[in-house]
């Protein structure tokens, strides 16, 4: 759980340090703008951007019931962010497992990727797909899929 907040915390701390330097130099407007930018970066890379993560076992159980894909991800991953943003509102219909919060999820990803924790790894009908196109993932949510 701590690892998933490490990058956002680092963004906020760095932004605060740089903004403090700018305030001391008399550039309060620049300091506020820069701090806002760092806070936005922190928010984008935080677990808050993604739908609430659940454990791998619960995600697999839910997927078996409703047929929705399971996405294994981690914060700070640019490919996970790309998928999340390109999916838009559809992302909430997926089951998201943060591999930095769930060791069982990390183990599933390693098993599917020859020992690597490559994310996003999307499981559809029990089959892994590494870094698939977000449009393809959206198609897997359609009733006809």
Image (cartoon, rainbow, N blue to C red):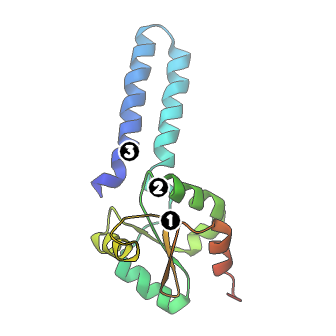
Q: Which residue is mark 2?
A: 48
Q: Which mark is residue 145?
A: none
Point out the image quarter for the N terminus.
Answer: bottom left
The extreme front residue here reads 114
Horizontal side of 142 relative to 22 (left or right) equals right
The extreme top residue here reads 26
Q: Please give the name of the residue rendered at 51% of the width and 55% of the height, measured from the top-left corner.
A: 49
Q: Position of residue 143 (x, y in %)?
A: 69, 87
Q: CA distance from mark 3 to mark 2?
A: 13 Å
Q: Please give the name of the residue rendered at 33% of the width and 46% of the height, measured from the top-left corner.
A: 6
Point out the image quarter for the C terminus.
Answer: bottom right
Q: Are marks 3 and 2 in contact (CB under 8 Å)?
A: no
Q: CA distance from mark 1 to mark 3?
A: 18 Å
Q: 49 or 71: nearer the eye? A: 71
Figure label count: 3
In terms of secondary structure, where does tag 2 sit? helix
Q: Position of residue 115 (x, y in %)?
A: 33, 69
Q: Position of residue 66 (x, y in %)?
A: 54, 89
Q: Which mark is residue 51?
A: 1
The residue carrying pointer 3 sits among few (fewer than 14), some (14 to 19) or many (20 or more) residues within 10 Å by Cα, namely: some
Q: CA distance from mark 2 to mark 1?
A: 7 Å
Q: Which residue is mark 3?
A: 7
Q: Please give the name of the residue rendered at 50% of the width and 92% of the height, measured from the top-left corner.
A: 65
């Amino acid at each position: 759980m701590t690892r998933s907040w490490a990058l956002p915390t680092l963004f906020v701390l760095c932004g605060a340090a740089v903004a403090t330097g700018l305030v001391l130099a008399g550039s309060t407007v620049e300091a506020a703008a820069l701090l806002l930018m760092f806070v936005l970066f922190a928010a984008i890379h935080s677990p808050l951007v993604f739908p609430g993560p659940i454990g791998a076992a619960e995600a697999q159980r839910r997927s078996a019931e409703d047929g929705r894909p399971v996405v294994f991800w981690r914060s700070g991953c640019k490919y996970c962010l790309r998928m999340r943003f390109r999916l838009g509102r559809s992302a909430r219909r997926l089951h998201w497992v943060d591999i930095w919060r769930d060791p069982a999820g990390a183990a599933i990803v390693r098993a599917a990727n020859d020992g690597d924790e490559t994310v996003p790894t999307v499981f559809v009908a029990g089959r892994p797909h590494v870094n698939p196109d977000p449009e393809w993932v959206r198609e897997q949510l359609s009733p006809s899929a």
